[in-house]
Amino acid sequence: MAMGFFQHLAGDRAVVYSGGSEPASEVNPSAIAAMAEKGIDITAEQPKRWTMDMLQAVDVVVSMGCGDSCPVLPGRRYEDWTLPDPAGQSLESVRPIRDQIERRVVALLDTLGIASG
């Protein structure tokens, strides 16, 4: 969801990668539905494992509860967004998580000097 908001709001003004330490086999259907309500289609996305190439290419690494399995590279800015895991939750339960992610992405874009929208 964070990648979807970032791409939607930043457009071609920034590049975003998404990966996890233990990616699921598919994108959560409730997350897909919640993002569709915002007009953002994430159906083509596939969960993937983060790579060192991804981490070396970015200025900011946002983690969401990966704990000790998150790699740390010198010179990178890190933000840990502690949010409930939407996995296995209903659309009704995912909506507030989606809205928190949207607010955080907007704030991140603001700190990066990237106008959203």
Image (cartoon, helix red, strand yellow):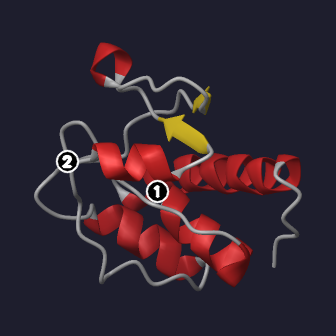
Taking the spot 55% from the left edge, 79% from the top edge, the residue there is 37
Taking the spot 58% from the left edge, 68% from the top edge, the residue there is 15
Disc 2 to disc 1, how far (Cα)? 23 Å
Taking the spot 23% from the left edge, 69% from the top edge, the residue there is 46
The quadrant holding residue 10 is bottom right
Q: Nearer the viewer, mark 2 or mark 1?
A: 2
Q: Nearer the viewer, residue 62 or 57?
A: 57
Query: Vertical placement of 21 versus 101: above or below?
Result: above
The quadrant holding residue 67 is top left
Q: Which residue is mark 1?
A: 92
Return the disc, 2 or 1, that comes first in the chain's sequence. 2
The quadrant holding residue 95 is bottom right
Taking the spot 27% from the left edge, 68% from the top edge, the residue there is 29
Q: Nearer the viewer, residue 72 or 110?
A: 72
Tag 1's secondary structure? Answer: helix
Q: Which residue is mark 2?
A: 23
- Amino acid bearing label 1: Glu
| Residue 60, x across and y down, in percent | 61, 42
Q: Is residue 93 visible?
A: no
- Amino acid bearing label 2: Pro
Q: Is residue 71 left or right of residue 93?
A: left
Number of marks present in the image shown = 2
| Residue 24, x across and y down, in percent | 16, 51
Q: Nearer the viewer, residue 71 or 109?
A: 71
Query: Vertical placement of 33 versus 94: above or below?
Result: below
Q: Is residue 104 left or right of residue 27?
A: right
Q: Is residue 2 visible?
A: yes
Query: In the rendered structure, are the residues bearing label 2 and label 1 in contact, judged by CB atoms less than 8 Å apart?
Result: no
Q: Is residue 112 left or right of residue 76?
A: right
Tag 2's secondary structure? Answer: loop
Residue reaching furthest to the left: 25
Query: Vertical placement of 4 versus 11: above or below?
Result: above
